[in-house]
Image (tube, grey):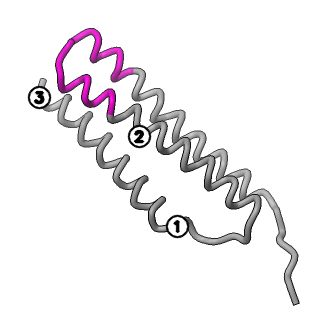
């Protein structure tokens, strides 16, 4: 006996959450890019690149996750997705913290 998949609103909420997260990270990246151009410090440029790559990574993984939820049975995100998101978050947070603390 196979159970019919209930599409519900969960895939839509998940997609919106990924998009909001990517948008917030993108906004922070834009502010950091502006700061990097104004200060011309190498650390600011590194932080801007880290934030931009993290925002793009979150957006791409969110899109993939949305497709997985729409076309297959509901399951937990794969281990590599969790590792990439954690690495992007740690990298972006560390880069911005490093820039802010270095004055």
Image coordinates of residue 79 in percent, x first then y, are 46, 67
Magenta stretch, residue numbers: 31-49
Crowd tier of the residue under label 2, counting other residues whose Cα lies within 10 Å: few below 14, some 14–19, many 20 or above: many
Marks 2/1: CA–CA distance: 18 Å
Q: Earlier in the sequence, mark 2 or mark 1?
A: 2
Image coordinates of residue 49 in percent, x first then y, are 33, 29
Q: Secondary structure at mark 2?
A: helix
Query: Looking at the rendered structure, which numbered label has been put on residue 54?
Result: 2
Crowd tier of the residue under label 3, counting other residues whose Cα lies within 10 Å: few below 14, some 14–19, many 20 or above: few
34 within the magenta span:
yes
Report how many numbered discs are placed on residues in the image.
3
> Residue, x 40% and y 36% (percent of image)?
53
Q: Main secondary structure of the magenta part?
A: helix
Query: Looking at the rendered structure, which numbered label has been put on residue 78?
Result: 1
- Mark 2 vs mark 3, foreground winner is 2
User: Which residue lies most toward the top here?
Assistant: 38
70 with respect to 32 (left or right): right
Q: Secondary structure at mark 1?
A: loop
Q: In the rendered image, which residue does mark 3 sit on?
A: 102
Image coordinates of residue 1 in percent, x first then y, are 88, 90
Q: Quadrant of residue 20?
A: top right
> Residue, x 42% and y 22% (percent of image)?
30
């Amino acid at each position: 006996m196979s159970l019919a998949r209930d599409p519900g609103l969960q895939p839509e909420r998940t997609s919106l959450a990924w998009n909001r997260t990517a948008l917030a990270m993108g906004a922070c990246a834009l502010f950091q890019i502006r700061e990097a151009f104004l200060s011309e410090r190498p650390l600011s440029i590194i932080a801007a690149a880290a934030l931009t790559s993290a925002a793009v990574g979150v957006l791409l993984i969110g899109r993939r996750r949305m497709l997985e939820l729409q076309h297959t049975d509901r399951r937990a995100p794969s281990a590599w997705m969790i590792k990439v998101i954690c690495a992007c978050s740690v990298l972006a947070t560390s880069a911005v913290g490093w820039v802010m603390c270095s004055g």
